[in-house]
Amino acid sequence: MDKLAEQLRADAAQINSPISPELDARIQASLQGITPEAAAPLPPKRESKSFSSWWISSLTGVAAAVVLIVVVNLQAPEPVPVVSNSTPQPLILPTVEWHARTAVLTSPLEQEMDNLQSDLKKAEEAVKQDIDRLF
Amino acid sequence: MASEVALIEAAKKGSAQAFTDLVSNYRDGLFRFLLTRVTSFADAEDALQDTLINAYRYLHSYDPRWRFSTWLYRIAINNAVRLRTADTEEIGDLRDEESDPLAHCIAASDRENLWQCARRSLNDEVCTAMWLRYVEDMSVNDIAAVLDRSVSWTKVNLLRGRKTLNAEMNNDATDTKSKAYG
């Protein structure tokens, strides 16, 4: 043992500190009032699955898959929406003969305005007549 | 006296007497160790009491692959750290010589006790490692387990602790010689 180790050991022995009877009594009293905790119970072992149960579960899985395939294949196919190639028939509207003349802006604006209003009135009357005639 | 294993088994079943017998060999050493780790004599007493109570209560968690003392010291260190006040994070920070529990337990001598030097100049863990190595004769592996450190960390820090204390010891010897020769 080297000098330092010897010195450390000797100096530790010089620490003179006996445990007092009061402390001893305190510790004893504390220990008497304590119950050591029991070790936590080990988790229960999982039982290994037997060979037969493995087979049963496998066969069940296979059977379920087969049934699913059959059911899917037996189902009637959904009607596929047919896209028609025919073009829509044009809507035939009755032709209306408009008895209106195109306004020609040759006069002053007020005169033009009067002309346009009289043209509009005539056009309205013509439309009314046409409507009466059609229906 | 019954073997340690038998005492442990009996204590696990609730025999306080078996536990008392079990720790009787360790109590004094543990108390001296705690005096180097806490800041007052009362704290050392509290730490010892808490250590023994915790050890008894949680004896089921003791792993017999380790030495019983290793486990006991681990609990003691935890208790000492818990009792340490916020203003004395490191024991070496102690400034008040009056409250130093170690100073009251060491007989007056012409040289300073090396454990007082260790307390002053080494950090907590290194000081603890030195105590466990040179006072408790623990192996490096056991010390590493107690401190929850790697074996290499323990070896390096034991070496550093040795160097520091060797220097302190030599300085002390030089001072003594100087005093002797005036």
Image (spheres, coloured by chain):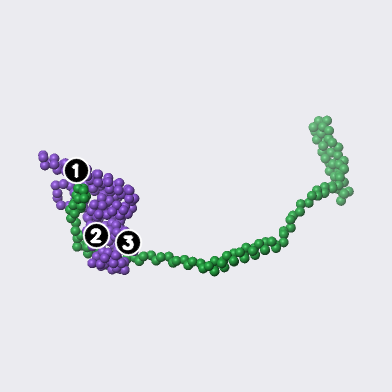
Q: Residue at x 49, y 66 (%)?
A: A48
Position of B158 relative to A39 (above/below): above
Subunit ID for the residue under disc 1: B
Q: Which shade of the palette goes to chain B?
A: purple
Mark 2 vs 3, N-terminal side: 2
Mark 1 vs 2, N-terminal side: 2
Q: Decide: marks 2, 3 in contact (CB < 8 A)?
A: no
Q: Are marks 2 and 3 on the same chain?
A: yes
Q: Residues within 10 Å of mark 2 (few under 14, many from 20)?
A: some
Residue located beneath label 3 in the image: B64
Q: Secondary structure at mark 3?
A: loop
Subunit ID for the residue under disc 2: B
Q: CA distance from mark 2 to mark 3?
A: 17 Å
Q: Residue at x 25, y 44 (%)?
A: B163
Position of B159 relative to B60 (above/below): above
Q: Nearer the viewer, residue B71 or B75?
A: B71
Q: Residues within 10 Å of mark 1 (few under 14, many from 20)?
A: few
The nearer-to-camera label among 2 and 3 is 3
Residue located beneath label 1 in the image: B170
Give the x, y percent position of residue B158: 27, 48
Q: Residue at x 53, y 67 (%)?
A: A51
Position of A93 relative to A20 (above/below): above
Q: Residue type at mark 2?
A: Tyr
Say whether residue B55 is visible. yes
Say whether residue B72 is visible. no
Q: Residue type at mark 3?
A: Pro
Q: Which shade of the palette goes to chain A?
A: green
Q: Are marks 3 and 1 on the same chain?
A: yes
Residue located beneath label 2 in the image: B26
Q: Nearer the viewer, residue A32 or A128?
A: A32
Q: Secondary structure at mark 2?
A: loop
